[in-house]
Image: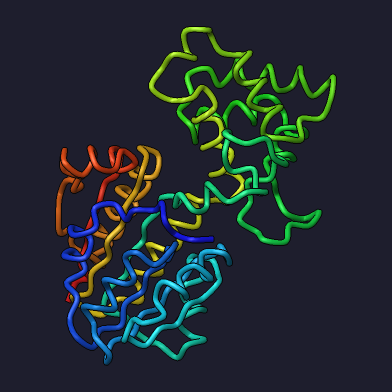
Amino acid sequence: MEDTQHIPVLFNETIDALSLENGDTIVDGTLGGGGHARAICAHIGSSGTLIGIDRDSSAIIVAEKNLADASCTKHLVNDNVRNLDSILASLGVDRIDSILLDLGWSSIQIAQEGRGLSFMRDEPLLMTLDPNPDEDTLTAREIVNEWAEESIADIIYGYGEERYARRIARAICEKREEEEIDTTGKLVDVISGAVPKSYHHGRIHPATRTFQALRIAVNDELGSAKDAIRKGVEALKPGGRIAIISFHSIEDRMVKHTLKELAEDGMIDLVVKKPIVPSDEEVRENPRARSAKLRIAEKRV
């Protein structure tokens, strides 16, 4: 699986935000294909250490290839970044100089077949990043076929900000009485039939927000990110930086509120009061960047 599609968003702004110096120990808590990590290694040099974390084992494989000739010391860890404290302890690392969290799904993850992450292919309705899901693993299939209508609607509205969440949830529950909704194709058909015809001509696919909501719920993305922010700040040296990129308003609100709480607790200072957003030029070159926001904070001395 080549990382030929994923373009790091707000690339220069993020690298600048981390205030990297030769010999630093840096955590890239959402490694992906290693796009940011490669630049980090170049800045911290052969005496620096990169700790790259990703819960997606396939991302680790791609990053290992893309970082093969990077000169810094590299520890690439297949784990959830919400476990940052135990990851650092296992590596014998007490404090870090900076941490990056890029909360967006990389295009290599969305494009990967067999997980049901995309509404563009007909696949088993999983949406989990667990490479070996078993009967105890939460999947989108379980949510769609077993959860109460009200709970499904709350997920679609709360995590997807989908205006037709109630209609979609009702249609899902009616359809599952006829047959199990076990593929992405079946779910897309249900969603498409539940929303007004005019909705099919909007800027995004009618299933976009529902699929986003289910991915967030299945992988507990907001809970994981909040844990990672708090543990990342705790691990920072005084004066160390945390940079966080979010890609939709739900993520950004969580990031904003979590950083505000940490600032009120006296742990950090906000480096920027308002998030940094991509330039018009970057959005033209990479439309995926249009909703990205970068927030930066610094550990108090």
The quarter of the rendered structure image containing the N terminus is bottom right
Tell me what residue is drawn at x 44 percent, y 13 percent: 201
The color scheme shown is rainbow
Q: Position of residue 147 (x, y in %)?
A: 73, 33
Q: Position of residue 124 (x, y in %)?
A: 72, 41
How many labels sit on residues? 0
Residue 100, placed above or below residue 201: below
Q: Position of residue 102 (x, y in %)?
A: 36, 57
Name the one closer to the observer, 47 or 153.
Answer: 47
Horizontal arrangement in the rendering, residue 178 relative to residue 21 (left or right) = right
Horizontal arrangement in the rendering, residue 231 relative to residue 200 (left or right) = left
Q: Residue 207 appears in which quarter of the rendering?
A: top right
Q: Position of residue 89 (x, y in %)?
A: 48, 85
Tell me what residue is drawn at x 72 percent, y 29 percent: 148
Name the one closer to the observer, 255 or 19.
Answer: 19
The quarter of the rendered structure image containing the C terminus is bottom left
Name the one closer to the observer, 285 or 169.
Answer: 285
Name the one closer to the observer, 14 or 123.
Answer: 123
Q: Residue 145 appears in which quarter of the rendering?
A: top right
Tell me what residue is drawn at x 57 percent, y 39 percent: 118
Horizontal arrangement in the rendering, residue 286 relative to residue 80 (left or right) = left
Horizontal arrangement in the rendering, residue 102 relative to residue 267 (left or right) = right
- Residue that extends furthest to the top in the rendered view of this protein: 197
Residue 31, placed above or below residue 175: below
